[in-house]
Image: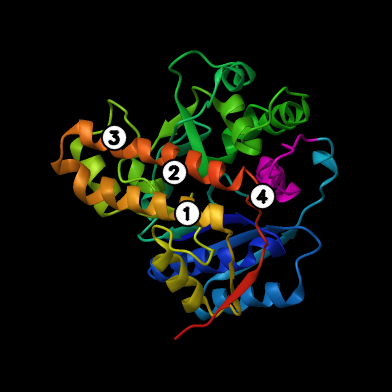
């Protein structure tokens, strides 16, 4: 089967993109993949060659698309940890890929662990896309901006099986760009907010195994999930989404998978970002809580778990008390050397 896959990246994310693509290619060898790579004009020749060499190694095709960003001028970005314009490229998919009606979009911070061809067999004629459940909106203002009812479901846009024919028929590109440029009191999730605003009520809910968040030991609480959905999410996910970023010099859940595929891809040097003391302590706590939930919580009373959960806030309070809230971080870069 021919699989049309879309990714968006710039130089900042090329290391992570290489790992994701290697996992996709390695676990879908029986299919022919056509990779549609959306880039800006700043992607270096070296990074482009990394993508070309990896794709040719597995016998697949890659097509690069240089994106004209002028239609996106004026889109809104949050002030804290803003993304680059590349985050909004996928809003333009129906126009960029005007010869295709169905594509699978994948974020770069993922590892694909299984065959994705069954996503291309979904009947999506009446849906804009297929995706997995998300826990947004995050507050009342967020919900108001999305014009959503209480209890309305939302989706995570890290993995989307897109019906571009539906987008064209409903003039979705124009409406999404208009919403992305609209002034808002609060910018939280950039393009994910845009997609959920435009396609609310018109998307197909996938099993949670297609977008397992790396730090979660349980899928979101949704009554429609069957027991086998929860088991597959935990023990046999199709895609791992590194929501807790693993490219740092401290352990993170599923970091071993991330490093495995980046090494297999041939990308070098592998760069791991140094984290400061405050973030390191928080990471140790998060990792402990992850293993606690994964291996201990199922066999213990809820009251003990609740008491343990409160330790996070106690530790943060003590850290701020001791340092008077003046802990600073000095960013450093570490080069990961494969054994």
Residue under numbered circle 1 = 281
Q: Are marks 2 and 1 in contact (CB under 8 Å)?
A: yes
The residue mark sitting in front, 4 or 1, is: 1
Quadrant including the N terminus: bottom left
Of residues 263 and 49, the one drawn nearer to the viewer in this rendering: 263
* Residue drawn at (69%, 26%) of the image: 186
Identify whether 57 is placed above or below 14.
Answer: below
Q: Residue 307 carries which label?
A: 3
Marks 4 and 3: which is nearer the front?
Answer: 3
Q: Residue at x 50, y 72 (%)?
A: 262
Q: What residue range appears in magenta?
A: 75-98
Q: What crowding class fits label 2: few (fewer than 14 Cα within 10 Å), some (14-19), or many (20 or more)? A: some
Task: Name the residue that disc number 2 marks.
Answer: 315
Picture quarter with the C terminus? bottom left
Residue 55 is covered by the magenta coloring: no
Instruction: Please state the horizontal and vertical placement of residue 14, each as a whole percent of the image.
Output: 63, 66
């Amino acid at each position: 089967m021919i699989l049309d896959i879309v990714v968006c990246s710039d130089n900042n994310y090329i290391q992570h993109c290489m790992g994701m693509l290697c996992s996709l290619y390695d676990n879908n060898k029986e299919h022919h993949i056509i990779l549609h790579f959306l880039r800006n004009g700043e992607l270096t020749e070296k990074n482009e060659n990394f993508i070309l060499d990896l794709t040719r190694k597995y016998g697949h095709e890659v097509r690069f698309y240089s994106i004209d960003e002028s239609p996106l001028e004026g889109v809104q970005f949050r002030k804290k940890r803003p993304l680059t314009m590349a985050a909004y490229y996928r809003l333009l998919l129906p126009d960029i890929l005007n010869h295709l009606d169905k594509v699978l979009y994948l974020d770069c911070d993922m590892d694909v662990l299984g065959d994705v061809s069954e996503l291309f067999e979904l009947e999506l004629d009446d849906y804009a896309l297929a995706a997995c459940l998300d826990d947004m909106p995050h507050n009342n203002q967020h919900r108001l901006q999305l014009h959503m009812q209480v209890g309305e479901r939302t989706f995570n846009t890290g993995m989307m099986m897109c019906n571009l024919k539906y987008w064209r028929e409903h003039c979705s590109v124009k409406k999404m760009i208009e919403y992305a440029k609209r002034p808002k009191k609060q910018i939280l999730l950039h393009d994910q907010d845009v997609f959920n605003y435009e396609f609310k009520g018109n998307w197909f809910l996938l099993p949670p195994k297609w977008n397992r968040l790396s730090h979660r030991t349980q899928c979101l609480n949704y009554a429609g999930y069957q027991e086998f959905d929860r088991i597959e999410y935990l023990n046999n996910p199709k895609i791992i989404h590194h929501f807790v970023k693993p490219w740092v010099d401290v352990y993170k859940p599923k970091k071993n998978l991330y490093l495995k595929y980046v090494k297999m891809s041939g990308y070098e040097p592998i760069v791991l970002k140094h984290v400061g003391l405050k973030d390191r302590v928080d990471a140790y706590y998060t990792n402990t809580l992850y293993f606690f939930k994964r291996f201990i919580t199922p066999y213990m009373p809820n009251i003990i778990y609740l008491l343990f959960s409160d330790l996070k806030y106690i530790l943060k309070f003590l850290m701020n008390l001791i340092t008077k809230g003046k802990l600073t971080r000095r960013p450093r870069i570490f080069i990961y050397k494969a054994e």
